[in-house]
Image (tube, rainbow, N blue to C red):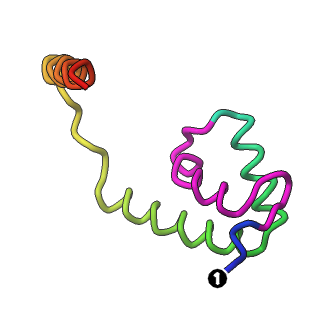
Amino acid sequence: MADLERNVAGMTCREVLGRLSDYLDGELPAEETARVEAHVQGCDWCERFGGRFGAVVATVKRRLGEPDQVSADVQARLEARLARELADR
């Protein structure tokens, strides 16, 4: 196992692993994306692990296909319910 506290390009391996799913989904801001990419370019362990992880994610997405769209009515009801649940906390 790699030393998850190794710091490459201003990020530790642990930080990269924590952002890997969002990175692969294209959900990181541009600055975070650049930081992850800089780390991976300089860290052979994260490059290998990230490549394997990315391949698994791509295979799962391909096999599952696109998710069904939620109707506007269902989405509105879910959002209202979530808002009520959060307000009750």
Q: Above or below — where is 33 with respect to 82?
A: below
User: Which corner quadrant of the image does residue 76 belong to?
Assistant: top left
Q: Is residue 79 magenta?
A: no
Is residue 63 toward the left or the right of residue 76 in the image?
right
What residue do we see at 77% from left, 74% from top?
44
User: Which corner quadrant of the image does residue 69 belong to?
Assistant: top left
Residue 53, image x, y percentages: 53, 68
Q: Could you tell me which secondary element the residue under label 1 belongs to?
A: loop
Q: Nearer the viewer, residue 58 or 85?
A: 85
What residue do we see at 69% from left, 69% from top?
4
Q: Above or below — where is 57 with respect to 73?
A: below
Is residue 47 toward the left or the right of residue 85 in the image?
right
Residue farthest along the bottom direction in this orientation: 1
Q: Is residue 15 magenta?
A: yes
Q: Report whether residue 72 is seen.
A: no
Residue 8, image x, y percentages: 84, 60
Q: In which quadrant will I find the C terminus?
A: top left
The residue identified by callout 1 is 1
Q: Nearer the viewer, residue 2 or 32?
A: 2
What residue do we see at 38% from left, 56% from top?
61
Residue 84, image x, y percentages: 19, 19
Q: Which residues are magenta?
A: 6-28
Residue farthest along the front direction in this orientation: 89
Q: Above or below — where is 83 with respect to 35?
A: above
How crowded is the residue under tag 1: few (<14 C-alpha within 10 Å), some, or many (20+)? few
Is residue 71 toward the left or the right of residue 24 in the image?
left
What residue do we see at 27% from left, 24% from top?
86
Three-letter amino acid code at disc 1? Met
Q: In which quadrant will I find the N terminus?
A: bottom right
